[in-house]
Image (cartoon, grey):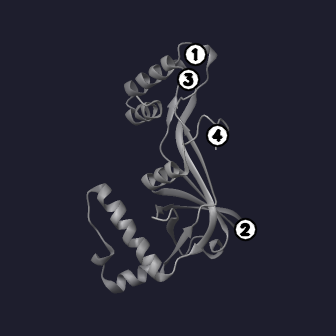
């Protein structure tokens, strides 16, 4: 995470809300062959744990249960040109972004918990694309075969670290100049993140 304490989310609850909204993580773990990373949708449960599933062929699956896992969750960021500041010669380009790291022990989900995870995934993610698919729409033998090919995991957070870097260390004039440049370039999301962080 960024070393500047100015670039922090205000609470673990905010970090978990960001994780829930982003809903996708890089999952890191150790294997006998060295560190490996998987990429998976991740959901935050009501008791503040993170659940995801991996294909059984993933290199992490045989080694993750009972081990420490690190989930890295990041949203798209924005490149900032030094030319956007009043004095480009006194500045450097930078990248503005939000990211959360969560680590803790991982455990394998029971078959019933895996069913719950798949139902939660559909209930959470389908509305985001205007759809209503559920596992109940699958042919039961096909659904059972698909579930046999995956393993669900839960991570209970032992540590949460955050970066929420959107120009908080800049003057109001500099921040407004960057917002204007981002909007002119078409990066309304990046401009919106700067406004959010400033309370504008």
Q: Secondary structure at mark 4?
A: loop
Q: Which residue is mark 1?
A: 88
Q: Secondary structure at mark 1?
A: helix
- Asked if marks 4 and 3 touch (Cβ < 8 Å), the reply is no
> Residue 9, located in which quarter of the rendered image?
top right
> Residue 157, located in which quarter of the rendered image?
bottom right
* Tag nearer the camera, 2 or 1: 1
Question: What number is the disc on residue 170?
Answer: 3
Residue found 54% across the figure and 76% down from its top = 56
Pointer 2 or 3: first along the chain: 2
Residue found 53% across the figure and 29% down from its top = 167
Pointer 4 or 1: first along the chain: 4
Q: Which residue is mark 2?
A: 33
Is residue 60 shown to the viewer in this render?
A: no
Per the model, the C-alpha gap separating discs 2 and 3 is 44 Å
- Asked if marks 3 and 1 touch (Cβ < 8 Å), the reply is no
Which residue lies most toward the bottom here? Answer: 141
Question: What number is the disc on residue 2?
Answer: 4
Q: Residues within 10 Å of mark 1 (few under 14, many from 20)?
A: few
Is residue 81 shown to the viewer in this render?
A: yes
């Amino acid at each position: 995470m960024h070393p500047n304490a100015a670039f922090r989310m205000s609470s673990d609850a905010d970090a978990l809300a960001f994780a829930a909204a982003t809903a996708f993580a890089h999952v890191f773990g150790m294997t006998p062959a060295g560190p490996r990373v998987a990429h998976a949708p991740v959901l935050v449960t009501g008791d503040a744990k993170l659940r995801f599933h991996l294909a059984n062929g993933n290199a992490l699956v045989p080694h993750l249960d009972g081990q420490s896992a690190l989930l890295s969750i990041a949203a798209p960021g924005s490149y900032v040109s030094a030319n956007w500041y009043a004095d480009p010669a006194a500045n450097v380009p930078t990248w503005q972004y939000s990211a959360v790291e969560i680590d803790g022990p991982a455990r394998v989900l029971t078959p019933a918990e895996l069913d719950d995870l798949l139902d939660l995934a559909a209930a959470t993610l389908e509305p985001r694309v205007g759809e209503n698919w559920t596992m109940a729409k699958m042919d039961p033998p096909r659904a059972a075969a698909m579930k046999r090919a995956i393993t669900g995991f839960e991570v209970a957070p032992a540590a949460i670290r955050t970066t929420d870097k959107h120009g908080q260390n800049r003057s109001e004039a500099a921040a407004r100049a960057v917002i204007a440049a981002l909007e002119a370039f078409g990066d309304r999301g990046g401009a919106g993140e700067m406004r959010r962080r400033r309370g504008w």
